[in-house]
Image (cartoon, grey):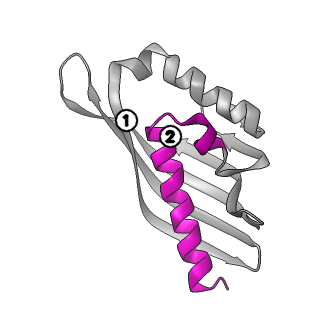
Amino acid sequence: MLGTQDQFDILALYEQYNHAIDAADASAWAATYTEDGVFDSPRATVSGRAALEQYVRAREASPAAQAVRPERHWNADIRIVGEGTQASGSCLLLLSGIQVETGKTVVITSGSYTDALVKTASGWRFVRRTVRTA
């Protein structure tokens, strides 16, 4: 069973992930993963920090991303289980934003994350993060 500090540190990782992707900070977002970490989504499966950074840059340059600013990632019902330096996590996802053209708030997508996590010398990191959208 994970201790309270480890659970808190994993929750902080989830927060760091959301803030980094919402700020389009490719390096900070990629740093939430291990060096060989994998992001698996309906759009792409991306492996390794360099590729993860490039994924964020390409995502931010897309016309769809430019039409909704700012984006905000929201998580709920976070569950974390594990022992020692290994853990798994899951949570619900809501992605919202404001349409640039209309100024209206919109739900971009909803879904869930399933995570494999490892405690490294730099703290907890995602080994694999799988997102499924509704």
Residue type, mark 2 in image? Ile
Of labels 2 and 1, earlier in sequence is 2
Q: Count residues near mark 1 (Cα–Cα under 10 Å), then give few for <14, some for 14-19, many for 20+.
A: many
Residue in the image at 33% along x and 25% along y: 68
Residue 25 seen anywhere in this rendered image of the structure: yes
Q: Secondary structure at mark 1?
A: strand
- How far across and how far down the image is residue 81, in percent? 63, 75
- How far across and how far down the image is residue 90, in percent? 56, 61
Rendered view: 67 above or below 14: above
Q: Is residue 4 magenta?
A: yes
State the CA–CA distance, disc 2 to disc 1: 9 Å
Rendered view: 75 above or below 67: below
Span shown in magenta: 1-30
Residue 43 seen anywhere in this rendered image of the structure: no
Q: Is residue 80 magenta?
A: no
Q: Are marks 2 and 1 in contact (CB under 8 Å)?
A: yes
> Magenta span: helix, strand or loop, mainly?
helix
Q: Name the disc covering residue 71, or none.
A: 1
Residue 80 is drawn in which quadrant? bottom right
Q: Name the disc covering residue 29, or none.
A: none
Q: Secondary structure at mark 2?
A: helix
Q: Quadrant of the C terminus?
A: top left
Residue in the image at 58% along x and 81% along y: 5
- How far across and how far down the image is residue 47, in percent? 77, 38
Residue in the image at 58% along x and 25% along y: 57
Q: Which residue occupies the foreground of this view, 7 or 129?
A: 7
Disc 2 designates what residue?
Answer: 21
Residue 9 is drawn in which quadrant? bottom right
- How far across and how far down the image is residue 33, in percent? 69, 50
